[in-house]
Amino acid sequence: MMTDSEWQKSSFSGNAENCVELRTASGAVELRESDEGHTILRTTPATLAALLHATKAGEFDHHA
């Protein structure tokens, strides 16, 4: 598998070591937790965009 970019974390994370990181790889998006780097979730850009949109719209707030 070829990676297109390096792992990146949100600027909101500051210097924290336990944050979500993402990168592009072979047309997909990969996510991992920085302190559990061996576990990687791989998805499509459209699916990630839909998840982010739903999260911002509060669709998962009842789970909190």
Image (spheres, rainbow, N blue to C red):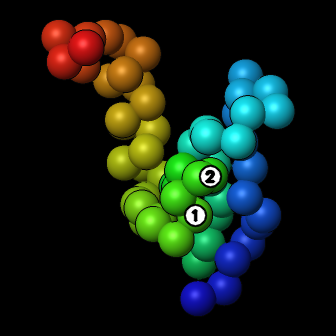
* Residue contact between numbered discs 1 and 2, judged by CB atoms under 8 Å: yes
Q: Is residue 42 left or right of residue 12?
A: left
CA–CA distance between discs 1 and 2? 5 Å
The secondary structure type at the circle numbered 2 is helix
| 58 or 63, nearer to the observer | 63
Task: Return the residue nearer the eye: 26 or 10.
Answer: 10
Residue type, label 2: Ser
User: Can you give x and y, in whole percent of width and height, for residue 49 in the image?
Assistant: 45, 38
The residue carrying mark 1 is: 37
Residue furthest to the bottom in view is 1
Report the residue marked by disc 2.
34
Q: In the image, what residue occupies the spot 73% across and 33% down? A: 16
Q: Residues within 10 Å of mark 2 (few under 14, many from 20)?
A: some
Of 14 and 55, nearer the camera is 14
Q: Identify the residue shown where x is 59% and y is 77%.
A: 26
* Secondary structure of residue under mark 1: loop
Q: Amino acid at mark 1?
A: Gly
Query: Would you say 34 lies left or right of 13 here?
Result: left
Find residue 56 and report its horizontal and vertical position in percent: 42, 16
Task: Quarter of the image for the N terminus: give it.
Answer: bottom right
